[in-house]
Amino acid sequence: MAIELNDPALHVGIVTARGESMLDFYIRVLGLEPVGQVNFAGLGVVNKLRCGGSILKLLVLEKPAAASNPGGGFSAATGIRYLSLGIQNLAAVVADCRSAGAAVVVEPSEIRPGAWAAMLEDPDGNALELMQVDNP
């Protein structure tokens, strides 16, 4: 049986031990809006950030995790490897991310007529694809 959604958005969670730098990147640099926090005693704090109709959940751990993201870009391992955002101001956002110290892994380039994409990494090394389609 197919799922019956009560919310049309896909919400994503990122687990981090680098709360301050991750929150700075997603709030100050990318401009996502904080919409709440949920504390889990002994685990950490989930910071909810609005991204269009979706919520990005940043779980800031109280204690370091036993393992971490293998890094190496989106094709270095299997599993959920990158977030993708459709935006309207690709060049300006990539410039802001670079100025904030984010690694720009793939410079903005036209991947098909009228569609531009770039790949960068957040402070934890998670891959973030930014895509601009000029005439969707």
Image (cartoon, grey):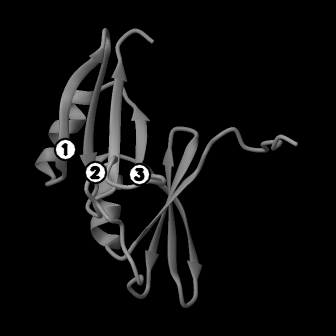
Quarter where residue 42 is shown: bottom right
Gap in angstroms between the C-alphas marked 1 and 3: 14 Å
**Residue drawn at (16%, 52%), measured in percent from left and top?**
100
Tell me the kind of residue under disc 1: Val
Gap in angstroms between the C-alphas marked 1 and 2: 8 Å
What is the number of the mark on residue 105?
A: 1
Q: Is residue 105 above or below residue 67?
A: above
Dot 3 and dot 2 residues touching (CB under 8 Å): yes
Q: Secondary structure at mark 3?
A: loop
Q: Residue 91 location in percent, x, y?
A: 20, 28
Sequence-first disc among 1 and 2: 2
Tell me the kind of residue under disc 2: Gly
Mark 1 Cα within 10 Å, few/some/many (few <14, many 20+)? some
What is the number of the mark on residue 81?
A: 3
Mark 2 — residue?
73
**Residue drawn at (50%, 76%), measured in percent from left and top?**
45
Q: Residue 75 location in percent, x, y?
A: 33, 47
Q: Residue 104 location in percent, x, y?
A: 17, 44
